[in-house]
Structures are given as structure tokens and as C-alpha cells.
Image (cartoon, grey):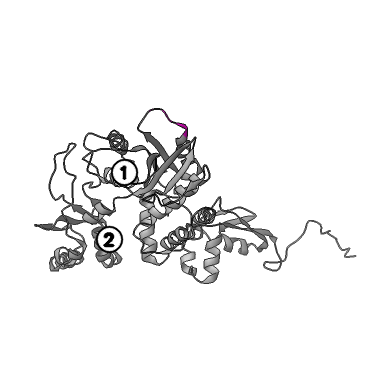
Amino acid sequence: MLFSRRAIQRMLDENATWMSTKSLRDLRRAMNNPDDPSPLSREWEIAVLNALSKIVMIDHEPDLGKRPDIVYQMSGETVIADVVAMSDRTRHRRNPVEALNDRFAERLAPVVRTGIKGGFCLSVGPRSFRMQQLETKATELHLPSIDRFDEVVFNQHFDTFMSELLAAPQVPHHYSINNAECSLRFSFSPNSDGWTLDKFRYTQSTMRECNPIWNALDDKRADLEQVDVLGHRGIILCDGDCDTLRDETEWDHYGARDIISSFLREPNKIEFVLVLVPLHISNRRDMRAESHTIGSYLITRTKDLPGWIAPIKDLASQLPQVHSTSLNARYEAAWRREAGKWSEGFTFRGACSVSEEKIRMSARDLLELLAGVLRQDDFEKLPFMARSNPFLQKLAHGRLFKASSIEKGGEDADDDWIIFEFGDPDPAATTFRGNSRWKSFDRDSG
């Protein structure tokens, strides 16, 4: 998810003061459905409407010939807008390299468990080599559809490759396909490690007017131009994992700003486009919520910003803390769907701080451990336990619990901290000891 589950619930509750019961129920059902094809789209709709409602009174999906997401009045003017979350889902479906990579990993798992040492590399070729310049058809990977994987890729030839690898893991091996349906090479090297996926980038927008952003803007333009009321029309583009929305124009592909600016120069009724993109702003390994923010920019048909556009301009400042980039949110959604953990939010799993008097850990970790959901052996593998069990250290010194308390994990965080305080060594759990208050008496032997 992009936002914490607590934040989404809070926004749904707040939206209930002005949104219709039917719309709320539809959003709730979609968010609770692991099979919903576009969960990030639902999150963005809830969050954008909630943020804007804190700035101006909005009318949601009124019947005006079409039902736009947003209508509001400002400075005597009517503003009409739709919200759309952009993704590369169609491009991923046409280029199923992630599914292929997962299938390779699944088939190689038994081999890896034997203790084989080395590295694997999956290289996928393009369907055709394009001229590396603008206004040429984007690259597509030369792969079969998912339902053809077993026949084209994981067939008797792959079984032979696996047998040869197991028989002689001390030498390199490779498995290649180059036919009308597929072009790939899967290799093993005993002198490397890890897993590498080598492919052409197929999510670039190489044509200004034939790409996901332009197509979405044009679809929304057609809808908004059918709204039977005078007003200023605009579109709010949200990142549901779309590379082009995060790209800048380069010599061989277009970025979002260039595409949107070109669209607004066309003779249509759209006057503005607001772009919202979750960003990771810290180092690569720091995945805390605080290491993410929402980048936003507004592109208008005219240079001057009229008063009626102020709520749109300020919308991003009212959004809750984002917890993830859209790419990571998509991967997490797929993992939760597969693992049956759709209704669970972000946790502080494995995080802990230890001092002389206190241990601070995830409240969810403790609850799941006591409930038997988190197994004892998995708990002991958590980073702070694997190094040296801090609870065992306290017990070894006879230091028992003195107090415990709950510390909120942060605004809208899906987990909290439980803090255990420890007292001085307790004779109930350690040897008897001396005391500085004791007096020493020397007995007179005479």
C-alpha cells in the first residue's frame, strides 16, 4: 500500500461526512478485495478526495451528463476534475518478464537448496531492435504469453539443462532459446553469485502521442467534455506505477512534463493537469515512511494561476504520509495477495532498541508471537534476536519486568512500540547478593 491502513480508514471515516454511502461502500469493498486489479487506484481516489475536501467543499460524482470525480466552486467559478492513477499494467501484460523471472526462481529453488555455489543470469532479447530515437515504436520483449511458458521455456530441454547443472555445478552452464516465440539466455556461473535479470526497458514512452499518459489524458478529456455544465476542467494524474510519469525527456524517450504540456497545447477544454508521484528521498536501504514524500507539480494551459485553482495547487500538502513508492507498493500488494496477508499493514517487524533499563520493540511482533502466528524459531531469527537475545541477557542478570507501556508508532502508522522497563537484579531470579548498608562485625575470639 502507498498509505497506512490506519490512514485509509481515517480518510474513509472523514469522507463519510460528504460522500454518498454507495460510493463509500464501493471503495471499501474494493480495498478489501485482494483480487481487485488496481488497488493503488482506489487508494489514490480516497486520498485525493480527502485532501481536497479539507481545502474546499466538493461535490463527488454529481449527475451532470457524466459523473466527474470532483466539482467545486471557488471565486465564483466552477471547477470540474477527474482523478486517474497511471500504471504500466498493460505493458507488463504484453511483456511478462517478471512472471518469467519468478518461474525461473521457482524452478531453480530445489537446486539452490542443495547448496550449489554460483550466480544466475536471465537475459531476454527484444522482439525487434528499434532505432534509438523519438517517434519510433517502443521496445517489446520477445517472450511468449504466460500460458505458453511451460511449452516454450520449461520443457524437456530445460529439464536437460537442470540435470547437467546438478551433475557438474563446478562449471558454467547456459540454456538458450531463439525462435519465433522467444529469445532468451539463462546462464549459471560458479565464479559469480546472486541473481541478475538483463532486459531492455519496455516501459519508456518513445512517441509523444501514443503512450499511457497521453491516452489517459485523452480518455478523461472525452469524459469531462461531456459534463453538461460550464466550468474549468482538469485532470489529477497519480502514480500507480508508471515509469513515464517519473521520467524526464531524454534523447530517446519522452517524460511526463513534455507529454502533458503538449497535450495542453491541443485545442481541447482541459485547462490544468496536477501530477502526484511518491518519492523515496533517503538512501537506498532506508525504507521508513519518513524516507518517502509525495512530489507534485501543476501544469496549466496559461502561465497565470487564477484563484479558482488554489485548492488544486495546495492539494498535495493535505495528503497523509506516504509509506512507499508506487513500484514497491505494487510488489507488496502482489506479495500480500499471494501470502494471504491482504488485510495486514506495515509493521516494525524486527526493529528494536535496547538500553540498560529498557527494551523497545514492535507491539505487533509481540502480539503475533504470543498468539502463535509468529513462530518462536522465526522470532529468534529477527535481526535483534539473531545477534544476541536481549531478553535472555536481562534474565541472566536477574533483571525482571518493572513496567511496560505502549508508544504510538507515528501518525497513522500501522504498528506501535511496546516498551519494557527492567528493574535492578531481583533475588527472585538470581543469587543472593551483599549490600553496602551491611555492617561488618569482627568477633572477639578471646
Q: Is residue 189 left or right of residue 314?
A: left
Residue 99 — which label? none
Residue at position x 32%, y 36% in the image: 257
Residue at position x 21%, y 37% in the image: 252
Q: Amino acid at mark 2?
A: Asp
**Does any portion of residue 112 appear in the rendered image?**
yes
Badge 1 or badge 2: first in the primary sequence? 2
Residue 4 lies, in percent from the top left, at 48, 54
Residue toward you, 38 or 142: 38
Find residue 195 and report its image quarter. bottom left
Residue at position x 15%, y 53% in the image: 142
Residue occupied by mark 1:
221
Residue at position x 89%, y 63% in the image: 444
Pick the quarter of the image with the N terminus.
Answer: bottom left
Q: Amino acid at mark 1?
A: Arg
In magenta stretch: residue 304 = yes
Mark 2 falls on what kind of element?
Answer: helix
**Does any portion of residue 280 appear in the rendered image?**
no
Residue 102 — which label? 2
- Looking at the rendering, the stretch of residues picked out in magenta corresponds to 303-307
Q: State how far apart marks 1 and 2 are (Cα).
A: 38 Å
Residue 315 lies, in percent from the top left, at 47, 41
Residue toward you, 202 or 216: 216
Q: For the residue carrying disc 2, how many other residues have a C-alpha within 10 Å: few (<14), some (14-19), or many (20+)?
A: few
Residue 35 lies, in percent from the top left, at 36, 64
Give the prevailing secondary structure in the magenta stretch: loop
Tell me if residue 154 comes above or below residue 254 in the rendering. Answer: below
Residue 201 lies, in percent from the top left, at 23, 46
Tell me if residue 442 comes above or below residue 80 in the rendering. Answer: below
